[in-house]
């Protein structure tokens, strides 16, 4: 169990309070206290399921061959959907919104697909790995945001089709674009390029304070962003339960969760 110390909160508050171009870079640890487990930790989704078997590519390949995906696909999908249903922004998300309201935070760059930063009220969010509630057409590439209610309705119909063991019913449960093309969740699968990296890199290199929250730094190329921030002259603050891969770049490391640490920094700045 980690031991949180508040001794570094005033230092972090001074750094952030003086920032002209604060940028936050967040990972799965940011949403952990919203009830969304991290994928790579022991017991996480990728510890219990094979991610390659759960990709959209694997699904379409199975259906093209006239067979249904493995049973794990439905089990994973149902667990993930029920987790999303219960999730809501936590005090860490609210703190980033407070930084924005104070005129300090210019953008959130996130590896998360859960839409919680937007739900918390942040206006400028770059989602490197996409958004689970947004779909993209495989034919014309047009995107459509379904929102939570629309997504859950589609998802449950799709899972019921999978459980029926009827391949035609599964195909019919896939949403269609106005052009007639099949649509898939607009999230980055394994082996696919991340979204908006150039924009994220530009914001990163313009930052003067770079706040790293809840990411292990294992997923490239997103994990390269803190190094770019440091080389561009930014001060780096890392808030993590365990020190990530940024030890050589971090100016200040605070061991703790986003929901514990970030609200305290906000209170210190407001004082």
Image (tube, grey):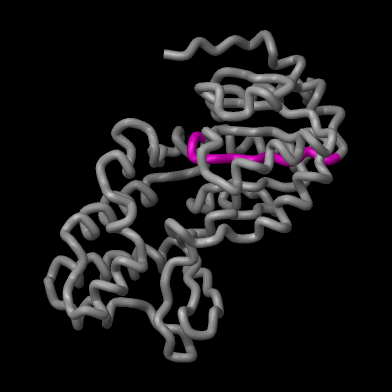
For this orientation, the residue located farthest to the bottom is 179
Where does residue 153 sit, x and y in percent of width and height? 33, 68
Q: Residue at x 80, y 24 (%)?
A: 15
Q: Residue at x 45, y 33 (%)?
A: 33
Asked whether 253 or 102 is in front, the reply is 253
Image quadrant holding the C terminus, namely top right
Where does residue 168 sit, x and y in percent of width and height? 19, 83
Whether residue 95 is situated above or below residue 132 in the rendered picture = above
Asked whether 233 or 151 is in front, the reply is 233
- Residue 169 relative to residue 149: left or right: left
- Residue 91 relative to residue 17: left or right: left
For this orientation, the residue located farthest to the left is 165
Q: Quadrant of residue 35?
A: top left
Where does residue 12 sit, x and y in percent of width and height? 74, 21
Q: Residue at x 55, y 29 (%)?
A: 259
Image quadrant holding the N terminus, namely top left
Q: Residue at x 15, y 66 (%)?
A: 163
Which residues, given as a range, are shown in magenta?
21-29
Where does residue 155 sit, x and y in percent of width and height? 32, 65
Whether residue 132 is situated above or below residue 44 in the rendered picture = below
Membership of 25 in magenta stretch: yes
Whether residue 209 is situated above or below residue 153 in the rendered picture = above
Membership of 90 in magenta stretch: no
Whether residue 51 is situated above or below residue 269 in the rendered picture = below
- Residue 61 relative to residue 200: left or right: left
- Residue 7 relative to residue 161: left or right: right
């Amino acid at each position: 169990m980690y031991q949180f110390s508040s001794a570094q909160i005033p230092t972090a508050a001074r750094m952030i309070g003086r920032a002209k171009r604060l940028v936050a870079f967040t990972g799965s640890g940011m949403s952990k206290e919203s009830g969304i487990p991290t994928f790579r930790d022991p017991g996480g989704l990728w510890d219990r399921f094979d991610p390659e078997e759960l990709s959209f590519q694997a699904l379409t390949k199975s259906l093209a061959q006239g067979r249904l995906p493995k049973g794990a696909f439905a089990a994973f999908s149902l667990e993930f959907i029920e987790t999303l249903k219960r999730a809501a922004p936590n005090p860490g998300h609210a703190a980033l919104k407070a930084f924005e309201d104070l005129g300090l935070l210019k953008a959130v760059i996130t590896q998360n697909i859960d839409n919680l930063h937007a739900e918390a009220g942040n206006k400028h969010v770059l989602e490197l790995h996409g958004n689970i509630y947004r779909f993209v057409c495989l034919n014309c590439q047009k995107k459509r945001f379904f929102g939570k209610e629309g997504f859950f309705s589609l998802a449950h119909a799709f899972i019921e089709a999978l459980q029926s063991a009827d391949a035609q019913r599964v195909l019919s449960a896939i949403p269609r674009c106005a052009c007639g093309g099949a649509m898939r969740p607009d999230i980055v699968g394994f082996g696919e390029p991340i979204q908006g990296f150039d924009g994220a890199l530009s914001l990163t290199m313009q930052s003067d304070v770079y706040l790293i929250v809840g990411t292990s730094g294992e997923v490239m190329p997103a994990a390269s962003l803190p190094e770019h921030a440091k080389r561009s002259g930014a001060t780096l603050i890392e808030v993590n339960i365990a020190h990530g891969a940024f030890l050589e770049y971090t100016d200040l490391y605070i061991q703790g969760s986003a929901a514990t640490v970030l609200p305290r920094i906000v209170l210190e700045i407001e004082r």
